[in-house]
Amino acid sequence: MADVLGLHLVQHLDLIDSPRRSVLARVDGSGRLRSLDRAGGDAEVTALAAGAEAAALVVDAPLAAPAPTGRRDVETVLSWCDVTAFPVSERRLRQVTGGARGVALAPALARRGRWLAETLPDLVLRQIAWERAHPPDAAALDLADYRAQWLAVRAPAYRPKGAGRARPDGVLAAWRLLSGALDLDGWHPTADADDWGAIADAAVIDAACCAYAALRVERGEGVLIGSPERGRIAAPTDANLRARLALTLERLRAAGAVEI
């Protein structure tokens, strides 16, 4: 199986030319982390991604914002499946990040022979946590039982929330989950508990989560929800999440609530 790539893309426009915080993770078909590369500005990010041969590239940033306001169909579907998803629109991206960097870079990140999608690292970690207690190849639960149990599962909070608010315990918890699903080839969080160390660690975790989502889809153990033009998210799934997504899509399409 070919390698896959995961990209943590710094989205806040005022941070793009700060230290090289975007991270590209390469994972091989066996699930082993092969490399971690850092980049800063748009030219560095696109050159790094363009020079990497891989079957897929998954990014933790919106790559499409088809409407001025509201949210995309993919967020509507995920919300009905009890997955928290940032509502993506042109106005929302301007308000929160100062612009739509992922949308602007999407054409340059695309490459013939590999598919491109977004993911939500929190959903990836949440699904890993779910599968630690529920074998991913087991039959689906009754929908009510699944929903009740799924609501009790949370991804660790590991991203710093401002100066002096590093979350070393959350970083370690996220790393433990991820290292149980991927061979991280010896990478582990820095021992420094300051904000800069936590920011760097969170970026690596995000990039590795993106690569893991791509790997799961390539293995047939995940799904692509949506479309490149209207927003497409890659997610690892078990029988429970697959069944719930399928039911939700069928219902929302029948109601004319989504176009994906």
Image (spheres, grey):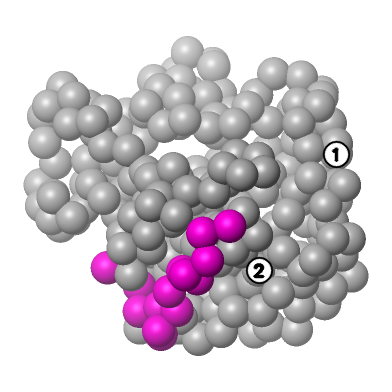
Q: Quadrant of residue 215?
A: bottom left
Is there a contact, CB below 8 Å, between mark 2 and mark 1? no
User: Along the horizontal axis of the image, is 244 left or right of 231?
Assistant: left
Residue 191 drawn at (x, y percent)? 47, 70
Residue 180 drawn at (x, y percent)? 27, 68
- Residue at the spot of label 1: 99
Would residue 120 be visible to someone looking at this image? yes
Q: Residue at x 54, y 16 (%)?
A: 256
Seen from the viewer's position, the closer of residues 107 and 259 is: 107
Q: What amino acid type is highlighted by mark number 2?
A: Val
Q: Secondary structure at mark 1?
A: loop
Could you give the CA–CA distance between mark 2 and mark 1, rounded to whole angstroms?
20 Å
Seen from the viewer's position, the closer of residues 158 and 5 is: 158
Query: In this rendering, which labeled residue sits more in front, label 2 or label 1?
Result: 2
User: Along the horizontal axis of the image, is 213 left or right of 50?
Assistant: left
- Residue at the spot of label 2: 23
Q: Is residue 254 above or below residue 67?
A: above
Q: Residue at x 22, y 40 (%)?
A: 240
Q: Quadrant of the N terminus?
A: bottom left
Q: Overall secondary structure of the magenta stretch?
A: loop
Magenta residues span 180-194
Q: Is residue 179 above or below residue 82?
A: below
Q: Is residue 49 above or below residue 260?
A: below
